Each structure stands twice: as structure tokens, then as C-alpha cells.
Amino acid sequence: MIHNVLPSPVSMPLKPPAEGDRHFSVALSFYDDYAQVVDFGMPGVALLAIDEPAPLGHGRGPEPARVLAAAIGSCLGSSLLFCLRKARIEVEDLHTEVRGTIARNASGRLRIASIHVQLAPAIPAADIERLHRCVELFEDFCVVTESVRGGIDITVDVAPVAKGASHA
């Protein structure tokens, strides 16, 4: 007799969204060994191959930890861009670098122990002083970072790159 069998995740109903909530889904399909293909279910968006690095996998795509790092970096970048644009600060470019550390926990299991994100927005030199308000606010609006921060130590630095001469 089989006990505690959960229904297929596809058939599991989600909690009805509250006003303003939205659901999302992605579908992963086995490819071979440990490689999987992610379908975001969005027209015009390419599939993404995810694979574990050797010796477990073949490294045919980013490993899940890198995908999470990219999601954190992208979300923080979007949040910072939104704030800077609301403040009418022209952003010429934004370079984001995300570095992570994988370490063993107390049970000996590998976990993402920490992630450090550095964002370098290229903004006019005259606007550097106005950047501080956004730096104080933007992290709270990053859905991904704030969703995983309880389990991963995440640090963030903003190092603006001044573009053009100051008009002072």
C-alpha cells in the first residue's frame, strides 16, 4: 500500500491569487544525465538548458546556482534602474556582477552560503549625489532577493561610474 503520495505538480492547484497577486510557472524537461531544459512558457523566449558541472553533469548549461545568481542580479538591476529612472537620473549603462559561495552546511550538504552583488550604473557625474536615495530603497523592491535572503547571506554594493564632466 502506498501512502502520502502527492498529486502531480501540474495538477496541484495554486492558492487563488489575492487581488494584485500573479502566478507564474516554468516547465523543466529531462534531457540526459543531469541536464534539463527549461521552458518559460513565454512566446518568443528561448528555452534554457541547465546542467550540473562535471563530474556529476556535463556543464552543457549553467548550473541551478548560477541561474539563481542571475535571477538575483537581474532583479536587483531592474529595481535599481526603476528607482533611478523615477528620480530622472539618466542611466547610460548598468554592469552587474554576482559572485557566490557554495559551502557545506552543518549536515554536510552543499548549499549556497553567500551571494555578493555589485551593481555599477553609469550615470552623469552631476547625478552621483542624487543616487543615494535609490541606494537606500531599491533592494526592498527586488522580489527575488527578498524572497531568498532569509536562507542566503546576500550583500549588495552600488559603485556608480560617473559619465561626463560635472557641471558644478
Image (cartoon, helix red, strand yellow):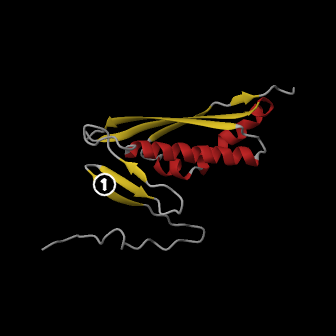
Can you name the residue that lies furthest to the left here? 1
* Badge 1 density bin: few <14, some 14–19, many ≥20, Cα 10 Å: few
- Tell me where residue 116 appears, x and y as whole percent: 50, 35
Residue indicated by mark 1: 31
Q: What residue type is labelled 1?
A: Tyr
Q: Where does the N terminus fall, quadrant-wise? A: bottom left
Per the image, label 1 sits on a secondary structure element best described as strand
Residue 137, above or below 125: below
Asked if residue 14 is positioned above or below residue 57 in the image, the reply reads below
User: Is 76 left or right of 129, judged from the image as shown?
Assistant: left
- Where's residue 61, x and y in %? 38, 44
Residue 12 versus residue 4: which sits nearer the camera? 12
Across and down, in percent, residue 103 comes to 33, 35
Image quadrant where residue 166 sits: top right
Q: Position of residue 78 (x, y in %)?
A: 62, 47
For the point 59% across and 71% down, the residue is 19
In the depicted view, which residue is nearer to us: 125 or 16?
A: 125
Q: Residue at x 53, y 42 (%)?
A: 73
- Tally of numbered discs: 1
- Left or right relative to 102: residue 81: right
Q: Decide which of 156, 81 is in the foreground and name it.
A: 81
Q: Quadrant of the C terminus?
A: top right
At horizontal 69% and vertical 42% (from top left) the residue drawn is 134
